[in-house]
Each structure stands twice: as C-alpha cells, then as structure tokens.
C-alpha cells in the first residue's frame, strides 16, 4: 500500500506512520479557481469542492504511481490522506467512493479524511462572487466537451434541440492534441449557433511528476470540474456526457486486451455508482449519456446538423495518443490511424457515408510492429466474435443490471461497423 499525504500548505503538520509521499496542492497546477467563476450565481457547495479536491488527488496519484512498478504491472494499492471540508459526510460514503474509483481505475484505493477550512484563495473567490455585479449565467444543462467526435456531436444535437442555456466543460492536460481541437470546435460552434464564449469553460489540471500514461481516473477529475460548476446554481441540473454506447461498454476485442482496454469513463456500472455518490453527497446533478444505445456510426449518421458536422470532422480528435508524433519530430498533431479509438472513428465515418478528411499517420497498418500487432488483434477479435456469446461478453467489463437486450444489440452493431471497415484486411490475411 502506497500512502500519499495531500496538503494545502507545505507548512501543514500532518504525517502517517511508515513511508509516505507528500503532495501539496500549492504545487499542483490546476485552474478551477481562475476560470470565470464570477459569472456564476453562487459559490460551490462544500460537498462539490470536496469532490473536486478528491478527484484532483486521485488523478495526481494515478499519474505519479506507475503501474509497471506494481506487483502485477497493473493494479496498484493507494491510500490517500486528504484534508476536506465535510469529513463526516465523506466518511459515511467512503465505501461507495472506493467502489466507484476502484471500478474506474482497476486499482485498490483507501481514503483517510481530516477536516480543513476554506483556503485563503477559496475565501477570496467566494467574496468576489458575492460582490460581483456581472450578469450571471442561467443554465439548465452542462455538457462535457472533450474535442472528440462524440462530444462534438453531443454539442450539435443539444444546440439544435435546445436554447443556448448550456455550459460546455473541457479539460486539457498540457500536451498537443487536446486544447487546439477544443478551441477550433468552440469557435465553430460559436459562429454556427451565435453562442458566447461564456458558454464554454476550459480547465487545466496536471500534477507535478506525472508519468503514468493510462490515466484511467481522468474522467472522474474531468466530471468533478463540471459538477463543481453545476453546484453553483443551487438547482438540479443535467450533466450530459456524450459517448457512443459501444465504447462505453469497454468490451475487449480479445482476452489479451482485457486489462488495458479503453477506459470505463461512461460504463453503465460506473455511471450508476457515480450517480449514487452524487445523490448521497446532496449534489443535485443528474448524469446522462444520451447515446448509451447508439454506435458511433449511428451518432454520425443521425447528427441533427450533418452538414456542419461533416465540415468539421477534421477538427475533432479521437486518437488515444495524439502526442506520439513528437517522437517522429512532427509539429502538427495527427491521428495515428491504428489505435482502437481511431479504428472505431474510421468505422463510424465509413458507416455514415461521409468523406473522411481526417489526416491519419497510418491508414493501412504499415508503419511498424505496433500497427501490425494492433491489426492482428482486431482481426483475431472479430474472427472469434460469437453472436451467441454476446449476452455474456457485454458483462465482461462490469455488471449490467438492466437493459441487457439493448446492450447486447449495441455491441453487435458496433462489431458490424468494425467488420465493415476492416473487411479488406480480413480478406487479405
């Protein structure tokens, strides 16, 4: 078990027995308290601030502690010691918090809470928000806005259907491949739907010393920023998390990819656990993925402004490692073309019959061993796919308590999209 002690001040006297790592939020680079909060009607609740702090600490530990150093090169045991504003409430819900984060990251987490007061920075922001005379935002929904294809479709569909009382929430971590895409799409949405920049909030968060690249806890931190914003409105709001239902099920194509397959960001079990946690903390936010039963191809096909989407697909980023081009000396971010998110993207655009103008570094798996290994893995997974087992396969990555027939159907339709885009490779092997 690795003990990590978080402090808001390097001068705070708190320690644990045995070896531990000390991390200070004074050294953690994050921008929440510097981001247009004066436009919001109220200061966030203590519970929302605590959730944000916990998410930053979890994300920091996730980045600092390398998986390869664990006993099986994957699962880590981490104990966080955290200062919070409402320790009693968190202690009442610590088991639920642990189940939620354990499922998301695949690790074993422990939490010890101790009481704190608002920091000087938080008090300053609270007082500024109370004194400001700036016109306040009044919204009914928030929507996660990552710069990916799914989140862009989610934004378009919301703006086609709703008034403009929506906040779009983004996060970036400092590397290429995230912020530039978010900014490009934001400008296009502002022009197309006559939005204000005040409809968009973008947050930076990066712990010092972060080396681990799996970052499974990123979505918890990402969502917690939006939840802290939502808590400023003192009314029940919907937090839209647009992601296609096939990827949300997190079903590995082959058993060899079970441990490291894509994240559980919107897996139905995680969403249920997280919703229960929000309810227990008294946070009036409803999590909702409107595309839970849509494939990515269906999302593209049924987008409510398909011409606008088609013209801006090139501005969306789906690749799981867009920064890899730096190793080749490239200055421009580019989709690799061979990782699973890239293949699902290519399959979706192909399925929708849209001209894919995305620049892929490798479209035919010819760039080297990694690309060929990826292709062989996909082909093996598709070859072994058994529709009779689909009902069982959908439960490989986590329990599903309802809608099993719909989940089974989305899985089969997602596989069909992948088969179509990879059929030429399958025929040639």
Image: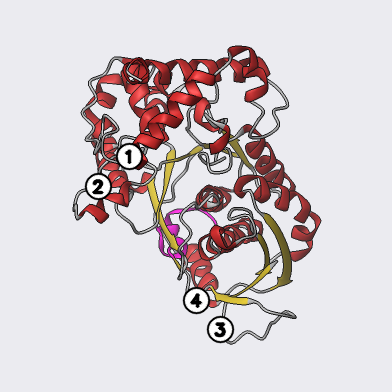
Name the mark on residue 26. 4
Indicate the quadrant containing the N terminus: top left, top right, bottom left or bottom right: bottom right
Q: Is residue 35 magenta?
A: yes
Indicate the quadrant containing the C terminus: top left, top right, bottom left or bottom right: top left
Disc 4 packing (10 Å; few <14; some 14–19; many ≥20): few
The mark nearer the N terminus, 3 or 4, is 3
Q: Position of residue 421 (x, y in %)?
A: 35, 19
Question: In which quarter of the view is residue 77 placed?
Answer: bottom right
Q: Contact, CB < 8 Å: mark 3 with mark 2? A: no
Residue at image mark 2: 333
Q: Contact, CB < 8 Å: mark 2 with mark 1? A: yes
Q: Secondary structure at mark 1?
A: loop
Q: State how the image is colored.
A: secondary structure
Q: Residue 12, relative to residue 272: is it above or below?
A: below
- Left or right, 156 with respect to 252, comes to left
**Which residue is depicted at the point 53% across and 43% down?**
260
**Which residue is depicted at the point 27% across and 29% down?**
364
Q: Nearer the viewer, mark 3 or mark 2?
A: 2
The mark nearer the N terminus, 3 or 2, is 3
Q: Is residue 85 magenta?
A: no
Residue at image mark 3: 10
Residue at image mark 1: 317
**Which residue is depicted at the point 27% across and 49% down?**
180
The mark nearer the N terminus, 4 or 2, is 4
Q: Residue 272, relative to residue 102: is it above or below?
A: above
The mark nearer the N terminus, 1 or 3, is 3
């Amino acid at each position: 078990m690795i003990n990590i002690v978080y402090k808001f001040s390097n001068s705070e006297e708190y320690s644990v027995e045995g070896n531990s790592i000390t991390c200070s939020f004074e050294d953690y680079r994050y921008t929440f308290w510097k981001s247009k909060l004066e436009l919001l009607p109220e200061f966030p609740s203590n519970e929302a601030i605590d959730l944000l702090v916990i998410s930053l600490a979890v994300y920091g530990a996730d980045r600092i502690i390398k998986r390869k150093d664990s006993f099986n090169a994957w699962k880590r045991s981490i104990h966080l010691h955290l200062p919070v504003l409402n320790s009693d409430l968190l202690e009442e819900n610590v088991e639920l918090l642990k189940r939620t984060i354990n499922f998301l990251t695949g690790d074993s987490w422990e939490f010890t809470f101790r009481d704190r007061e608002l920091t000087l920075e938080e008090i300053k922001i609270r007082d500024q928000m109370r004194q400001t005379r700036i016109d306040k935002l009044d919204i009914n929904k928030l929507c996660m806005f990552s710069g990916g294809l799914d989140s862009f479709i989610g934004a378009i569909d919301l703006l086609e259907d709703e008034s403009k009382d929506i906040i779009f929430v983004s996060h970036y971590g400092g590397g290429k491949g995230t912020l530039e895409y978010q900014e490009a799409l934001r400008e296009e949405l502002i022009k197309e739907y006559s939005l204000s920049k005040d409809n968009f909030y973008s947050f930076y968060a990066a712990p010092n010393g972060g080396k681990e690249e799996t970052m499974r806890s990123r979505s918890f931190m990402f969502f917690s920023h939006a939840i802290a914003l939502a808590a400023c409105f003192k009314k029940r709001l919907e937090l839209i998390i647009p992601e296609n239902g096939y990827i949300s099920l997190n079903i590995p194509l082959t058993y060899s990819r079970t441990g490291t397959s894509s994240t559980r960001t919107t897996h139905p079990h995680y969403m249920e656990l997280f919703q229960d946690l929000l309810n227990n903390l008294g946070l009036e936010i409803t999590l909702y993925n409107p595309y839970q039963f849509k494939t990515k191809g269906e999302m593209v096909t049924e987008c409510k402004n398909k011409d606008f989407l088609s013209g801006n697909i090139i501005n969306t980023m789906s690749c799981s490692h867009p920064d890899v081009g730096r190793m080749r000396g490239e200055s421009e971010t580019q989709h690799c073309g061979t990782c699973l998110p890239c293949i699902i993207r290519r399959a979706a655009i192909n399925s929708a019959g849209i001209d894919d103008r995305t620049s892929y570094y490798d479209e035919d798996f010819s760039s080297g061993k990694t690309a060929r290994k990826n292709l062989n893995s996909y082909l093996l997974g598709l070859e072994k796919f058994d529709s009779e087992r689909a009902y069982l396969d959908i439960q490989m990555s986590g329990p599903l308590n309802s809608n099993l027939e719909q989940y089974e159907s989305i899985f089969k339709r997602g596989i069909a999209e992948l088969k179509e885009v990879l059929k030429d490779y399958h025929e040639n092997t």
